[in-house]
Amino acid sequence: MQHKTQAVPLEGIPGDSASSDWSEVLMPDCSSEQAVKLARQAEERGECGLLLRGAECYLRLAGGEADEKAALEYAGMGRHLAVRAVERCPGSGLAHYLNACLTGHMARLNPVQGLELVSVLEYEAGLAAELDPAIDHGGPDRMLGELYLRAPGFPVSVGDTEKSVLHYSRAVKIAPRWFDNRYGLVDALIADGRIEEACLQLNDMFSGLEFCSRCDEEKWKKLLGLFRKLCASVESDR
């Protein structure tokens, strides 16, 4: 199950405190050489901050890698560091969030393991949401919202549109102007058959002209897709 973390816009990694203070940016880019160096230092010193930096570096590499085999390798290396970070600093919401993100990448890139990894993703994202819900603009709840929206339903997997709406709503409360939070909530409301609420939320997305002033072409296409999906739902209800 994929959580959309392509080039995840994490705002930086804190030190050993592993709090949600993301004012210190890790690095504008992350090379494979930097990832190897961070991983080596993290393994040698076992410090929470280094483990988190290494995990984020590999997450960036996995998200930006077009070759799926290489991306899976990056995700696996990053997840190893994230698991170590969870063990080293279990109270860090960021550690659990990075573990969930990297697990999501592995599930998407390795479908054979995908369903097995869903429970890990759900658990780690849930802990992150409890410990530090503001990470990545409501990232833990946004991740859970997408998981419940995209996964097959019971008994195959954990898919549940009502839960999806709940978690996307929480993400919107945390970061109401963050595009993916609003977009996901509208998508989940449509999937749950709550068309009127979806219309109101979509209207809110455009209530301020500045909301999408920085939207790229991909985001505008996603918005148009939501409009089409909403219109199709309205037509089917007639």
Image (cartoon, rainbow, N blue to C red):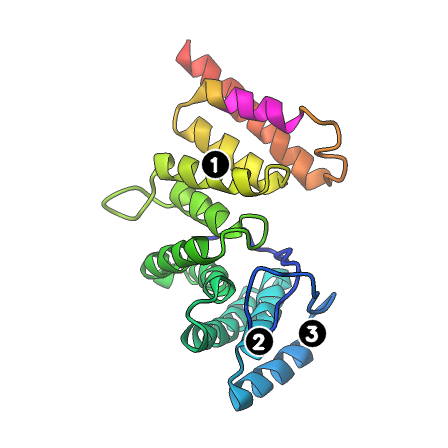
Residue 224 lies, in percent from the top left, at: 63, 28
Mark 1 belongs to which amino acid?
Answer: Ser
Between disc 1 and disc 3, whose residue precedes? 3
**Res 181 label:** none
Q: Cα distance, mark 3 to mark 2?
A: 18 Å
Residue 194 quadrant: top left
Tell me the residue at 76%/35% (across/down).
213
Residue 75 lies, in percent from the top left, at: 51, 69
Is residue 118 shown above or below 185? below
Q: Nearer the viewer, mark 3 or mark 2?
A: 2
Mark 3 belongs to which amino acid?
Answer: Ser
Between disc 2 and disc 1, whose residue precedes? 2
Disc 1 residue crowd, few under 14, some 14–19, many 20+, Cα 10 Å: many
Q: Is residue 179 left or right of residue 208?
A: left
Between disc 3 and disc 2, whose residue precedes? 3
Q: In this view, does 174 lie to the left or right of 27?
A: left
Along the viewing direction, whichever of 91 and 219 lies nearer the viewer: 91
**Res 49 label:** 2
Disc 3 residue crowd, few under 14, some 14–19, many 20+, Cα 10 Å: few
Residue behind mark 3: 31
Q: Are marks 2 and 1 in contact (CB under 8 Å)?
A: no
Mark 2 belongs to which amino acid?
Answer: Gly
Q: Nearer the viewer, mark 1 or mark 3?
A: 1
Disc 3 is placed on an element classified as loop
Disc 2 is placed on an element classified as helix
Residue 127 lies, in percent from the top left, at: 40, 58
Q: Which residues are drawn in magenta? A: 198-206
Q: Cα distance, mark 2 to mark 1?
A: 31 Å
Residue behind mark 1: 169
- Counting the numbered discs, the total is 3
Q: Is residue 203 magenta?
A: yes
Outermost residue toward the top?
A: 238
